[in-house]
Amino acid sequence: MVDLNNANWSMDGDVFKVLINGEGQHSLWPSAQPIPDGWRQVGPVGPKKDCLDWIKANWPDIAPLSIRAPIH
């Protein structure tokens, strides 16, 4: 398993943004890079740890929306 807190992400600096796609999946993205098609920005822009903490707190079910069972 890769430890994302220690991975080398500094190719574009040390500031990141949190993205989400139409399936509700989240991604940590270098802030200097353009947002890819199909994604939009949510959450903080800042240090990697802050973004990863936000993702952990706000993405409790990593299953894509299309396969999640409806909640009644």
Image (cartoon, grey):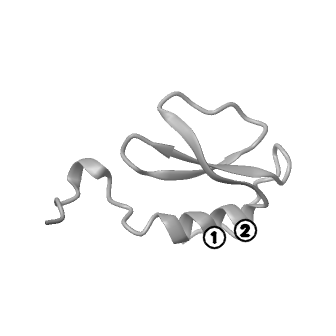
Question: Which residue is under mark 2?
Answer: 49
For marks 1 and 2, give the CA distance. 6 Å
Residue at point 38%, 62% (across, down): 62
Q: Secondary structure at mark 2?
A: helix
Q: Secondary structure at mark 1?
A: helix
Residue at point 81%, 45% (across, down): 11
Tell me the kind of residue under disc 2: Lys
Tell which of 4 and 26 is nearer to you.
26
Q: Kindly check if marks 1 and 2 are in contact, taking CB atoms under 8 A apart as contact.
A: yes
Residue at point 75%, 43% (across, down): 31
Measured from the top left, where is residue 44 in percent x and y? Answer: 69, 55
Measured from the top left, where is residue 25 in percent x and y? Answer: 44, 51
**Most distant residue in the front direction:** 72
Say few, some or many: other residues with alpha carbon within 10 Å of mark 1 (under 14 / 14 to 19 / 20 or more). few
Q: Which mark is residue 66?
A: none
Question: Which residue is under mark 1?
Answer: 53
Measured from the top left, where is residue 12 in percent x and y? Answer: 82, 43
**Most distant residue in the left direction:** 72
Say few, some or many: other residues with alpha carbon within 10 Å of mark 2 (under 14 / 14 to 19 / 20 or more). some
Vertical arrangement, residue 25 with respect to residue 61, above or below: above
The quarter of the picture where the N terminus appears is bottom right
**Most distant residue in the top direction:** 37
The quarter of the picture where the C terminus appears is bottom left
Measured from the top left, where is residue 54 in percent x and y? Answer: 61, 65
Is 15 displayed left or right of 34 in the figure? Answer: right
Look at the image and tell me whether residue 33 can be seen: yes
